[in-house]
Amino acid sequence: MITNYLIASPHKEWADALSVQLSNLGLSYDRAFNGKEAQALLHKNNYSITLLDLELKNHSSLEILRYIKLSKLKTVVMFYVPYAGILNEYGMTLGILKRLGIMEVLLPTMTPLAIIKKLRHWSDPNVWRHIPFDPLKREEKEKSLSDDEFTKVNIQEALELGIAAFDHYLRLAPDKYVRVVHQGEPFPVSTIQNYINAGVEYLYFYTSDRLEYINLMNELVRKMIDASPHSDDLIIKSLKSVADKYINEAYTEGIKPSLIEEGKSFCNNVYSLITKDKDLHKKLHDMEYMIPDLFSHSFLVSFYSILISKQIKWVGKKTLESIAIGGLLHDIGLMELPEELRKDSPHHLDNDQKIEWEKHPLLGAKVLQGSPFVNEQVRQIVYQHHEYIDGSGYPNSLTALKIYPLAKIVAVGDGYVNKMTELKVSPRETFKAFLLDRTNILKYEPNHLRALAQSLI
Amino acid sequence: MKQNLLIIDDEDLILHNLKYLLKKHALTVFTANNGKAGLNILQKNQIHCVICDIFMPDLTGVQIIKEVRAMGNMVPFVFFTAHGNHDLMLEAAKYGAFEFINKPYFESLEEIIINGLREGFERSSTSNILTKENEYQEILDMFLAALKDTNVR
Ligand SMILES: [Fe+2]
Ligand SMILES: [Fe+2]
């Protein structure tokens, strides 16, 4: 039998009462008592409805909501608000919850049966058709808006989101759009299916709407984290692409969505390319499970190296691919070191350990010698990613003209990502701090820093 | 503005084909089928980019780049490499390799050579007006100004 509902709540009595009624009616459900359990269950199973208690801890309800949205899980989300004041405490209103795509807000005054009625309503696969909502009839006429302000999204993917987090438009002609779904409302399945049948491939949204949405989400999550004492991160294997999983929105905030998508898809492509090599696949797999931080670091370095390269005129397509792969593999040599040395930076290592740690560029280049999917460009990026133009790097203390140009780009990506991880601030704030650090003036090419700046604004 | 290219490879057929393929990008394409001849050309001419096979019977690419750097010449070197030359490549890197082309895949050859010639030209002409400090300040100013704009919007 398909499990339909997920009840994620630390309020045992309330959840028990609901569970009893569900069992009586022969309906199946899963229970989670904290956010981590909820996320693990969501990863494993498909739920038609997820019921999130606003007081969920250890992954807050908003973090779970964000996980659901970013993973594009097809589940209707309802929030349980255990007492009225809690909304205020978290700086939220019912309006905000609606904007986040919450279909129902459940209050403690509702009886289990009343709640089940709502659950049944939303888990009916035909419920979308019953919604008295025909955007085209209700909708305004076409508008003249500028193409520059829109970002397109695959229509099929949009449909799978269930609920529109912001307004979506259909593009009729250059600079001509008509709105087909409003923020907070479900995508009208049959209407959109008609568009798809008619050959429409994309829907459009205001680029600024999405940023606003992401910012709102990030801000709320931050507030909630501040308000609740523990919230550890848990790496959950999700159904999403590996880049989506490891390059989360906190690391890309403020960057143009089109650049983000392009960078991520590039990462995904080269990842699937190099993992055709069985040995390399095993090494990366070990890295992902044994040192997830390093794995995520590798994706971020690849992502930012791509962004930088995109702004540099002389980088062609093949070169870009080598840079992306080089970024992914730059620290692969760390996997050849004893476990305690497998860290993305040598802070907190003693001198002897540091000497060992600094062997990882050479070890990495050696490891890659056997791979038919890795060319000399990639090996040299790995070998030289800790060389700096002032000659302060290793293993060969090369100076500006001698360092392999592609390795210099990945070195900037590496240095920048390390700064971001260290400071835990937004990409832009990180860049400011990065540039104000005078040692970076000596270590990196100004052109590369300029390219990084350009991709962040 | 075209620059001078030198190709060093022990296979005459490769020399011939590459010269034919690349002549439109360079003022003159010099060729040498061994390291000694190559070094000779480098001493007598202003060369802006060198394409060099890494593995040759007389001098290896590593020995050639080592000599050239000893002459105080920072001309960009593009190495032809093949499977099995890995340790030579790591050695060559110590003297400053500009690019690597994996034999027999010459797909991005032209793009790389155009970049190499441009880089070689920049290295031979000293026209760096901005000091590095100024350049950083300029980048920072540009970045902060752009952020202000987006925040206002
Ligand atoms: Fe490293
Ligand atoms: Fe790194």
Image: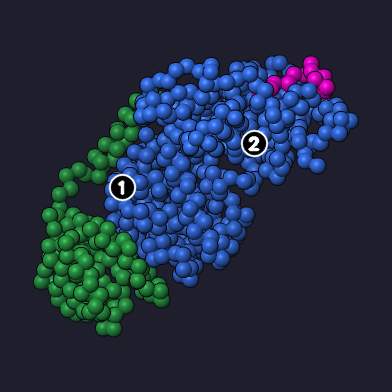
- Residue tagged by mark 1? A312
- Which chain shows up in green? B
Left or right relative to A447: residue A135: right
Nearest the camera: A323 or A341?
Answer: A323
Image coords of residue A408 (percent x, y) = 35, 54
Name the outermost residue toward the bottom.
B57
Q: Say what secondary structure mark 1 lies in.
A: loop
Q: Which image quarter is the C terminus of chain A in?
A: top left
Residue drawn at the location 29% of the way across and 46% of the way down: A447
Figure chain in blue? A
The part of the image, by quadrant, that contains residue B6 is: bottom left
Chain ID of residue with mark 2: A
First reached walking from the N terminus: tag 2 or tag 1: 2
| Residue interval drawn in magenta | A103-114
Check the image and report above or below for B31 versus A43.
below
User: Is A334 included in the stretch rendered in magenta?
Assistant: no
Report how far apart the C-alphas of labels 2 and 1 lie in the structure. 39 Å
Name, please, the residue furthest toward the right: A24
